[in-house]
Image: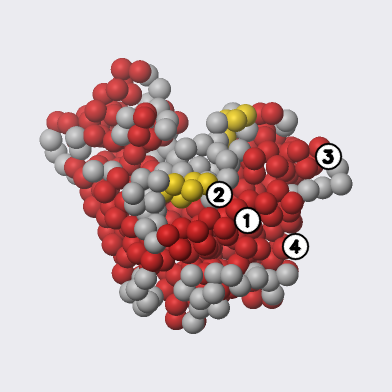
Amino acid sequence: MVGGVVRTADGSSFASGAGAVTSIGIDIVDPQLQASIAGILADVEAELRDSVFSADPFVTEAARHLVEAGGKRFRPLLVALGAHFGDPAAPLVVPAAVVMELTHLATLYHDDVMDEAPVRRGAPSANSRWTNSVAILVGDYLFARAADLAADLGIEAVRLQARTFARLVHGQIAETVGPHGGEPSVDHYLQVIGDKTGSLIATSARFGGMFGGAPAEHVEALAGYGETIGVAFQLSDDLLDIASDSAQSGKTPGTDLREGVHTLPVLYALGSDDGDAASRRLREILAAGPVTDDDLHAEALGLLRESPALKRARETVRGYAEEARSRLAPLPPGPARQAMQSLCDFIADRTN
């Protein structure tokens, strides 16, 4: 999917909304599946705009700010794919996808406040355009709208959406507070990603199966796939911040290093006992905190790119991608399962 556009195996694409061009690596070969997914995502886009309408024009403008900025629509896409293991035309599939995307968008408003981010999806963030208070309140409004729509899906959906939201909050708290004892921890980091990213993607895939009427065992398989592929995708993004050039990643390489964010390769490097000079020098630079000096930043980035830590992180990403693939085993073969498998291949290969 490319900024609301799903990329097909032959390189063509079909639009489902506007936004920045950002591939998420799902190849959809079957023309009927292409058409069905395009239709669902077009309906999701229309309902997203309607769902954030308020009698107050300012609230409508602020709430539509990120909706109109576009985005990958990864979560609605997984709802749509999951529904194809049942009936994708079932009436609650599109509302379920809207609930998931609204929940995701709400977290972005809050994330931008916590990160003091000036830009989101190529446009001024809500907090920089208005204020932190407005951004927080608009995020709350979107959570409320998602809960309102979830009520139409039934009590189980309300419970699942609430529990997913609770995991998101737990993940954000854990990231903010840090690991117990204050030491960087790989286990803590992976748990944060599972809670902040994997949880909502898992519920998206689950909702697709649920509201498409798929058998219970297929719904569970979809949820397991969503959780694991969500973690894999976030980890691969972290690796791209180190290993790629700006054209590939869409941002300046080493941004996390400058901000002092300890992603998986950095955690592996800090926790290693490799005694070679390069590894020792890398640990020395990283242990000092955010790498803001340009010369040190270039040195650290070069050392990381050649380090055993980056190789180990790549192996971890491939492990998650393969685990996600294995979670698809209970699902019947067909175009939807093939599309989901293609994302496993993409993630396994994108950081090499």
119 versus 176 height, above or below = above
Q: Residue 178 or 51: which is nearer the viewer?
A: 51
Of labels 1 and 2, earlier in sequence is: 2
- Viewer-closest of 266 and 232: 232
Please rate how many residues cluster around mark 1, counting C-alpha atoms within 10 Å: few if below 14, some from 14 to 19, many from 20.
Answer: many
Per the model, the C-alpha gap separating discs 1 and 4 is: 16 Å
Q: Earlier in the sequence, mark 4 or mark 3?
A: 3
Q: CA distance from mark 4 to mark 3?
A: 20 Å
Residue at the disc numbered 2: 16
Report the Cα–Cα distance between label 2 and label 3: 26 Å
Q: Quadrant of residue 255?
A: top left
Q: Residue 2, position in %: x, y?
A: 46, 44
Looking at the rendered structure, the secondary structure element under dot 1 is: helix
Look at mark 4 in the image and give the residue it sits on: 148
Amino acid tagged 3: Pro
- Number of the label disc, if any, that sits on residue 57: 3
Between 36 and 250, the one nearer to me in the picture: 36
Q: Is residue 190 visible?
A: no
Residues at marks 1 and 2 touching, judged by CB atoms closer than 8 Å:
yes
Question: How busy is the neighbourhood of tag 3: few (under 14 within 10 Å), some, or many (20 plus)?
Answer: few
Q: At label 2, which amino acid type do we have?
A: Ser
Which residue shows up at 24% across the image and 34% down it?
A: 305
Q: Earlier in the sequence, mark 1 or mark 4?
A: 1
| For residue 262, above or below residue 251 | below
Disc nearer the start of the sequence (2/4): 2
User: Residue 44 shows which numbered tag?
Assistant: 1
Mark 2 Cα-neighbour bin, 10 Å: few <14, some 14–19, many ≥20: many
Cα separation between marks 3 and 1 = 22 Å
Amino acid type at mark 4: Asp
